[in-house]
Amino acid sequence: MEVFLLYHINELNDDDSKLIGVYSSKEKAEEAQQKSKLLPGFKNSPDSFLIDKCKLDEDHWEEGFITSV
């Protein structure tokens, strides 16, 4: 099964992303995006939304990660 995640990403800082919600269809995620564009903070950067498709019950970080100092 696939779900659709709606994020708002800060244009100045990619590490500052907000998960708006998880939806059962792309259409529902798009509807939520349209509503969110009217809200304080989000309406100042309406082009900073991202809808990402994600499969349930799968690992998404299979190779780990490295942090830099």
Image (spheres, helix red, strand yellow):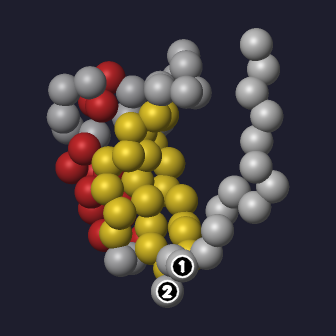
Residue extending farthest to the top is 69
* Tag 1 secondary structure: loop
Quarter of the figure with residue 5: bottom left
The structure residue drawn at horizontal position 46% and vertical position 34%, both measured from the top left corner, is 17
Residue 16: horizontal and vertical position, in percent? 47, 26
With 8 as the anchor, is 12 left or right in this view?
Answer: right
Near mark 1 (Cα within 10 A), the count class, few <14, some 14-19 or many ≥20, is few
Type of amino acid at the residue the image marks with label 1:
Asp
Residue drawn at the location 76% of the way across and 42% of the way down: 65
In this rendering, the answer to whether 34 lies above or below 54 is above
* Residue 27 in sight in this render: no
35 relative to 67 in the view: left or right? left
Q: Residue at x 39, y 27 (%)?
A: 45
Q: In the image, what residue type sits under mark 2?
A: Met
Q: Give percent across and percent down for residue 59.
A: 64, 68
- Distance (Cα) linking label 2 and label 1: 8 Å
Q: Is residue 32 visible?
A: yes
SS category of the residue bearing label 2: loop
Marks 2 and 1 close (CB-CB < 8 Å): yes
Task: Decide which of tag 2 and tag 1 comes sooner along the chain.
Answer: 2
Q: Is residue 66 left or right of residue 27?
A: right
In-front residue for pair 23/39 = 23
Q: Position of residue 56 (x, y in %)?
A: 51, 77
Residue marked by disc 2 = 1
Q: Is residue 12 above or below residue 41?
A: above
Tell me if mark 2 has few (under 14), some (14-19) or many (20+) residues whose alpha carbon lies within 10 angstroms of its own.
few
What residue did someone put label 1 on?
57
Judging depth in this view, the residue of 69 and 37 nearest the camera is 69
